Amino acid sequence: MMVIKKCIACNESFSVANNRRNSAKFCSRKCFHAYYSKGKKDSRIKIKCEYCDKEFLVYPYRKDTVKFCSFSCSAKYLFKMGVFKPRFKEGDKSWNEGNEMGKSAESSRMYARKKMELKKGDIRIVHHIDNNPFNNKINNLMVLPSQSEHMKLHYKQGGLNKNVCTNF
């Protein structure tokens, strides 16, 4: 059963579940924040991202620890600085060269489906033979019928290392 209430911030009517009839006061988060921040100064300060130079807001207590506007910028910066190195063997292409070197389990499935001429529903799990999730070369991909077969294969190879294969 739904109950009709009136938002205390914008005076608009909104419906709410019966169990929230006594606690609901706002029609949206926007109204909630507008109501409670009324008359208050935003205490956040602007900082420039070290990777993309975009300005973003942080609370003052974080000004010395936050350097990037997003996780994406942080990861790109760390790859650029050489802190993180992709897992590939010497002589292979680098992790971002060519369309064979995908970045996710989904791209592995798409690449395997394309190269092996399979239909969308045919591929459940793609295993990377060299345990490098970035290496989507066709001779490195093995299509498995189920997740349990994938786990069995990993245990036969000497245990499961969750940092190695990203398809589960």
Image (cartoon, grey):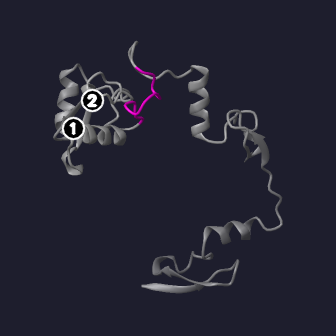
Kind of residue indicated by mark 2: Ile
Residue 164 sits in quarter: top left
Vertical placement of residue 130 versus 110, above or below? above
- The dominant secondary structure in magenta is loop
Residue at x 54%, y 87% (from the top left corner) = 4
Percent across and percent down for residue 74 are: 61, 34
> Is residue 168 visible in the rendered structure shown here?
no
> Is residue 120 visible in the rendered structure shown here?
yes
Of all residues, the one furthest to the top in this rendering is 90
Residue 48 sits in quarter: top right
Q: Are marks 2 and 1 in contact (CB under 8 Å)?
A: yes
Image check: 24 left or right of 46?
left
Q: Which residues are magenta?
A: 93-103
Percent across and percent down for residue 32 are: 66, 69
Which element is circle 1 on? helix
Residue 127 sits in quarter: top left
Mark linked to residue 116: 1
Residue 113 colored in magenta in the image: no
Compare residues 7 and 106 and report the one nearer the observer.
Answer: 106
Mark linked to residue 64: none
Image check: 2 left or right of 25?
left
Mark linked to residue 138: 2
Mark 2–mark 1 Cα distance, whole angstroms, equals 8 Å
Which element is circle 2 on? helix
Residue 99 colored in magenta in the image: yes
